[in-house]
Image: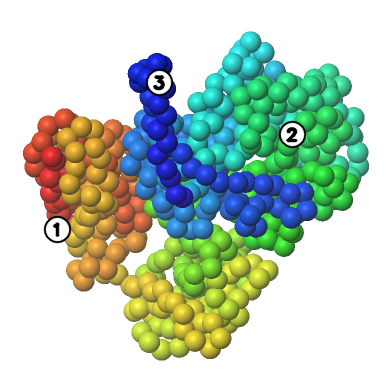
Amino acid sequence: PNMYTLETKVYQNGNLIDQSTNKVGVRQAVFDPDKGFFLNGENMKLKGVCIHHDAGCLGSAVPRKVWERRLIQLKSLGCNAIRMSHNPQAPDVYDLCDELGLLVMDEAFDEWEFAKRKWIEGWNVGTPGFEGSYDFFEEWRSRDIQDMVKRDRNHPSIIMWSIGNEVDYPNDPYSHKVLDGATINQPMFGGYKPEQPAAERLGNIAKRLVAEVKKQDTSRYVTAALAGVVMSNETAYPGALDIAGYNYTENRYEADHKKYPQRVIYGSENGHGMSAWKSVRDNEYISGQFLWTGIDYLGESGRWPSRGLYSGLLDFGGFIKPRGWFRKALWTSEPMVYIGTYPNYQGRRNSGGAGRLSQDAWPVWNYNQGDNIRVVCYMNCKQAKLLLDGKLVGDLKDYDDNTGIIYWDVPFQPGVLEVIGVNDAKEVCRYEIKSSGRPFAIRATSDTYKLLSNKDLAQITIQVVDENGVPVVLSDDEIICRIEGPAKLIGLESGNNSDMGDYTDNVQRVYRGRLLAYVQTQGTAGIVKVRFSAPWLKSAEVVLDIE
């Protein structure tokens, strides 16, 4: 992510009449239908995530430092690409992607000329509504998409422009006779519905939108995220694109690569499963994937209580979730290993058993003596073994390329549970979790202790620990935050999707023992004391120096 400063000066008759300074980057991005994606001549996979524009308790007003912390976390997991789903986002996000070396898919629309279903009562539940942007699409589409390109085209991080997301979902709203095929193998709302708009309309709209993009920028690829590939293949839509994104349609990769050998195919929206990743990893012609999602986001909520969708590698507070460690094992080469646990209740439906291998196993080692516990391991090593207080309790096991997960079933005993990653008979990494005692104290650490007076931000992590300083992952203590000095609390975020409490006050329960406080300066220099307290717990204080 090397950035340069470009100074441009305009002279008239020897006099300087105008000048500008811009940050620029130099790179070459190439997609090949057979070989996949190349950055500066290096063949690589796009290991991408989709993100929304909100940040939990902060809503849509997200300070730059919050995005910086989140994007750095994603990059640490092996992520190298970001999809702006499904609209242009804050300029800060693009600036940070430039500086961090993250590639960007910039996106314009989530619907075109007709309305898509809007789930009002719950995610895919109840009677949908149809309000949206479609009613002014025809009037504004040209200006909107050109404005996006003109605003963002100087960002070297952007490698492709997307003209739409899932506008071709079968019968939502477009339809085609091919949907009556017995072997369609494509998600849809029923078969062919002649009363719905004809899918053939997609091709003409796509051609017009692509032309609008290329009026402003011919240096990048134009794409779209296709949800109804089988149906769209019967239209001019995919052919109007430079490269074609497939949403959750890994089963079409091989057949479509053979049928359309000049088409560049990549996963524009994908699930977290091992099979979806192997469809990318094991097929040279597939350029990459974009997971849904990189970070938990507000909206698309499930049944009450739920404030958003919990599909991210990071939670609302930007903390890495277990599935983030699972992804790091798939996407990075530096040796790493992680263990998480859950009860293995044999014989109980959906609550354990030999077939259950979860990507969402939290690093907990607190159970009842003798409980049968499944310990799952995410790693990129060839082998791993499990120790409890230094004694072998899980034999050396080979990496499982079918699931990406190995496991041991262990009777619980308190202590230090440790996994050791092994390559060629040598230890290369290790990871441990400890049994904790009861919650005893609050530990608070800030990402910075020196701030500027003008709207600077400190992100303070609160961790509940026991008497020995061991994190108490099972804690749900309620924390009170009080501030003295020229700063204010703008949010407390635990990352708990089911917490429906007030996001704007100074009281919040930790989730899995953790909480994040956002403290913003108020334009005056001085010392700020941020105090955290809870009944029965030893309090903590962070002192910030504001210049």
Q: Which residue is label 3 attached to?
A: 11
Q: Which residue is label 2 attached to?
A: 241
What residue is at 55 percent from the left and 71 percent from the top? 380
SS at mark 3? strand
SS at mark 2? loop
The x and y percentages for residue 111 are 65, 25
Marks 3/1: CA distance? 66 Å
What residue is at 49 percent from the left and 69 percent from the top? 334
Q: Nearer the viewer, mark 3 or mark 1?
A: 3
Residue 500, quarter of the rendered image: top left
Q: Is residue 321 above or below residue 83?
A: below
- The foreground one among 540 and 446 is 446
Q: Residues within 10 Å of mark 2 (few under 14, many from 20)?
A: many
Amino acid type for the residue under numbered disc 1: Lys
Q: Nearer the viewer, mark 3 or mark 2?
A: 3
The x and y percentages for residue 536 are 16, 56
Farthest residue to the top: give it: 139
The x and y percentages for residue 36 are 71, 53
Amino acid type for the residue under numbered disc 3: Tyr
Labelled pair 2, 1 in contact (Cβ < 8 Å): no
- The foreground one among 244 and 434 is 244
- The foreground one among 432 and 503 is 432
Q: Which mark is residue 538?
A: 1
SS at mark 1? strand
